[in-house]
Image: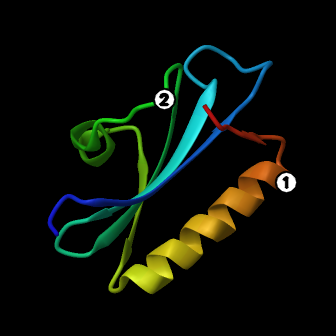
């Protein structure tokens, strides 16, 4: 489904600089499956923000399986670099 969010992993840092308290890794279905990685001071739940954030890193995948695999890789790398998984 176009613009459907298939994954939204959130991490945080206690000692973060302004604008970098939360890190989100999402997969959004568009023409392809897009992996978006972005940081901010609040957790974004609006899919439109996820797809239109000009500061996001964006990676393209032809299928959902590879996009979700990339999410898990990025999540693991983020945890390894000091980010903490966030569970509201």
Mark 2 neighbour density, 10 Å: few (under 14) some (14–19) many (20 or more): some
Res 87 quadrant in image: top right
**Residue 80 location (% of width, % of height):** 85, 54
Res 4 quadrant in image: bottom left
Which residue sits at x=61%, y=26%? 20
* Quarter occupied by the C terminus: top right
Nearer the observer, 50 or 60: 50
* Quarter occupied by the N terminus: bottom left
Which residue sits at x=59%, y=38%? 23
Residue 28 left/right relative to 59? left
Residue 8 left/right relative to 14? left
Residue 67, disc: none
**Residue 67 location (% of width, % of height):** 46, 75
- Indicate whether 28 appears above or below 57: below
Mark 1 = which residue? 80
Nearer the observer, 37 or 84: 84
- Indicate whether 34 appears above or below 9: below
- Indicate whether 78 appears above or below 69: above
Per the image, label 2 sits on a secondary structure element best described as loop
Residue 28 left/right relative to 18? left
- CA gap between label 1 and label 2 equals 21 Å
- Indicate whether 8 appears above or below 19: below
Structure colour scheme:
rainbow
Residue 43, disc: 2
- Closer to the N terminus: mark 1 or mark 2? 2
**1 vs 2, front mark:** 2
**Residue 25 location (% of width, % of height):** 52, 52
């Amino acid at each position: 489904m176009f613009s459907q969010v298939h994954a939204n992993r959130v991490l945080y840092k206690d000692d973060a600089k302004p604008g970098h308290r939360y890190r989100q890794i999402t997969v959004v279905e568009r023409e392809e499956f897009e992996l978006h990685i972005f940081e901010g001071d609040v957790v974004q739940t609006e899919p439109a923000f996820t797809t239109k954030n000009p500061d996001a890193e964006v990676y393209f995948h032809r299928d959902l399986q590879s996009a979700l695999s990339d999410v898990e890789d990025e999540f693991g790398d983020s945890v390894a670099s000091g980010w903490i998984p966030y569970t509201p």
